[in-house]
Amino acid sequence: MCGIVGYVGSKKAIDILLEGLTNLEYRGYDSAGVAVNVDGKVQLYKAEGKLQNLKDVVEKNYAEISKSTIGIGHIRWATHGAPSIINAHPHTCNCGKVAVVHNGIIENFKELREKLEKEGCTFRSQTDTETVAHLVASKFAKTKDLTEAVRLATKEIEGAYALCVIHQDVKDTIVATRRNAPLLVGLGENEYYIASDVPAIIQYTKKAMYLDDNQIVTVTPSSMKLIDIDNNPIQGKIETLPWEPVALSKMGYKHFMLKEIHEQPDVVRNVLSGKLRAMDEPITLKEVTLDKEKLKNLSRIQIVACGTSLHAAMVGKYIIEDFCGISVDVEPSSEYIYRKTITDKNTLVIGVSQSGETADTITAVRQAKAKGSHILIVTNRPDSTMAREADSLVPVYAGIEVSVAATKSYMAQLISFYLLAIYMAEIKGSMDVNELKDLKHELIVLPQKIEKVLAHKEDIQKCARAFSGSKDFIFIARGINYPTALEGALKLKEISYINATGYTAGELKHGPIAMLDETMPVLSILMKGKVYDKILSNSEEAKARNARMIALTDSSDTKLNELFDYIIRIPEISEILSPALAVVPLQLLAYYIAEFLGKDVDQPRNLAKSVTVE
Ligand code: M6R
C-alpha cells in the first residue's frame, strides 16, 4: 500500500526520495509525489500512475529540485478519492508552507474538514490526508513550533497514520509520527532518513530506530529528538537492521517472483536451522513463551490470517489437529473481527502474516488479547506491529519478499507450522516417536525435493503455455491439500487475472460440475495417501464432462496418462508434508501463465503487498 520516504542531510534529497520510493514500489500504488525545499520555498511534484511518470516530471526540473537537501516522498494507494495528481501526496495547507505525506486512514477527517473549512481552509483534494496539512498549519500559526503543531494535531486525529511533515519556515526539519502504521528513522552521518519500511533506506544505512505508537520524532541534519504525545522526552532504541541491500536485487531473474520461488530450498533450510537440530532432539522454538503446562491444557486454538497466510493457517490447522489432537479453528481476520470474540485464557490465538502489518489481522489479535488469550504471531517481520503485540513469536525468516504475490513467505509459514505442531506434540507427548523421526527426516530432505521440482520447470512452462489462453481454471484437492488448491488458484488469479477457484474435490458434484466443459481446465492435486483414489474418481467425473485435465502428482502410475491431458510429476513425499512441495509447481504455473500473458507479475493491478487498512 502507501509508502513514505523522508530525508534531511547534505545530499541531494530528490535522489534519495526517488530511490527509496522505487524500493517501496512493490507495495502497490497508483500515484506518487515529493515535496522539497528549494531556496526556502516548498515545491511539490506529483504524477499519476507508475513512479516513472514522477521521475519524468522530476527529470525536467532536476537542476532546480536537486538543490534541496530535505524532502518527503510518497507512493499512494487510493483510499479516499480516485488516483489522480490532485489526490496524490504530499498535501499542503492553504499557503503551501506545510507539506504532509501520510499512510493510513484518518477516520474523523470529515468532522475535522468541516471544522477547518469554517476556519477558512480551502480543500483541493478528496483525501483524508489534506486535513492533516491544514490542521498542522492551524496549530503552527498559534505555536510557531512544528513539533508542537504536529503533536497538538495528533491529539485531534483519530485513526491510523504514519505522517511525515515539513514546513517552509522551519529550516532543515522533518517531524514524523505514527499510530497503528509503521515508521522508522534511519541514522546516517549528519543525516536522517524516514521510511515506512526498511527497503526504502537499507542501501543508505543499517542503523535505525522504530517509532512506537504516539511517538513524535523531530530530525535535522545534526539532531534527533523523540517525545511522546504528552511531550515527555523518550530515549529511542537504535537497532541494526537485519537485511542486506542485495535482497532488493533480482539477481538475474526476470522477476522478483521467479527469484523468490527459487529461494525456497534455502528458505526451508533457514527456517529449520537452529530449531530442528537432530532427528532425536526435540524442536526448539526460543520465542514461544507459552508455559508448558498451559500448552498441555489448551482447549482450543484459533488462527487468524488473510490471503496466502490464511492458506498456510489452513494447513496449520490440519497438522496441529493431527499431531496434537487439539481442535483448531481458522478464520479470515476480516470476518473474525466483526463478530463476537469468543476466546479465553485457555485458547491460544495464532496470527499469521508475512508483513505483520495487515490491519485486519492486527485488530483480530488485539481483540483476542483483550479477552486474555495467549497471542502467538507467525511472521516474516519480527520488527512489525503484529510482532510487537505477540506474547510468543515464530519468526519465519524468509527474507524480504518483494513480489506482491507471496511465495517464499508461504513456504516459510508452512515449515514454521510443521515445527510448531511438532514442538507442541513433543510437549504433549501426543505423537509416536518413530513417526516424529520420519517427519523430521523428511523436513530435512525437503529442500532437495524442491530443487528437483525447480530443475524441471520447463515442463511446467510447457503446461503454462498450453493453458494460458484459458479464461477460467478450477483446482481440486482434498484434505491437507485443499489449502494448496486454494493457494494455486489465488496465485493464478492475482497475477494473471484468470478466474481461478479452488474446491474440495468432493464438492465438485454439488454445484461447480455444472460449469465443466472443454473450455474449463481442471487441475487435480493427486498426492499419494488416503484421499488419492477419491480425487482420482472426482477427476474421472470431470473428464466425463469434457474438462481439460491436468494432474499434479507424486505418483508414477502410468494409468494417469489416459485420464489427464497434462501431468506435472513431483518427487514422492508423505501426504502430511506434501503441501510444502505441491505448491511449488503451482507457483511456477501461475508465474509462467502470467508471463506468457505479458502481465505485470511483480506488481499486479489493484493489489498491495501489505494491506494496512481494514
Ligand atoms: O502480510 P500478510 O501475510 O498478512 O498479507 C495477507 C495477504 O494480503 C497476502 O497474503 C496476499 O493475499 C498476497 N498478495 C498473496 O499472494
Image: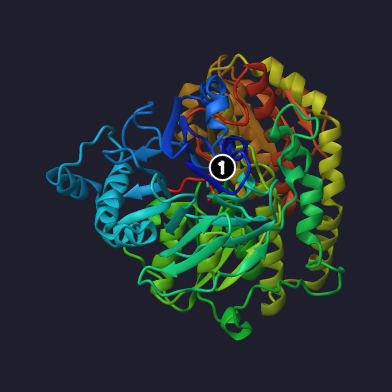
- Between 8 and 418, the one lying in front of the other is 8
Of residues 21 and 29, the one nearer the viewer is 21
Indicate whether 426 appears above or below 608: below
Q: Which residue is mark 1?
A: 69
Residue 388 relative to residue 250: left or right: left
Q: Amino acid at mark 1?
A: Thr
Q: Is residue 181 visible?
A: yes
* Residue in the image at 38% along x and 47% along y: 169
Q: 523 or 238: nearer the eye?
A: 238
Where 286 sits versus 321, above or below?
A: below
> Which residue ends up furthest to the bottom in the rendered image?
293
Q: Secondary structure at mark 1?
A: loop
**Which quadrant does ligand 1 occupy?**
top right
Q: How is the structure coloured here?
A: rainbow
Q: Residues within 10 Å of mark 1 (few under 14, many from 20)?
A: many
Residue 528 appearing in the image:
no
Q: Is residue 493 above or below residue 16?
A: above
Based on the displayed image, in which of its 4 quarters is residue 256 positioned? top right
Q: Which residue lies most toward the left here?
A: 118
Q: Position of residue 141 (x, y in %)?
A: 26, 53
- Residue at 78% x, 23% y is 561
Relative vertical location of residue 48 with respect to residue 395 in this rendering, above or below: above
- Residue 495 point in image, percent of width and height: 58, 28
* Residue in the image at 48% along x and 67% along y: 226
- Residue 86, image x and y in percent? 34, 28
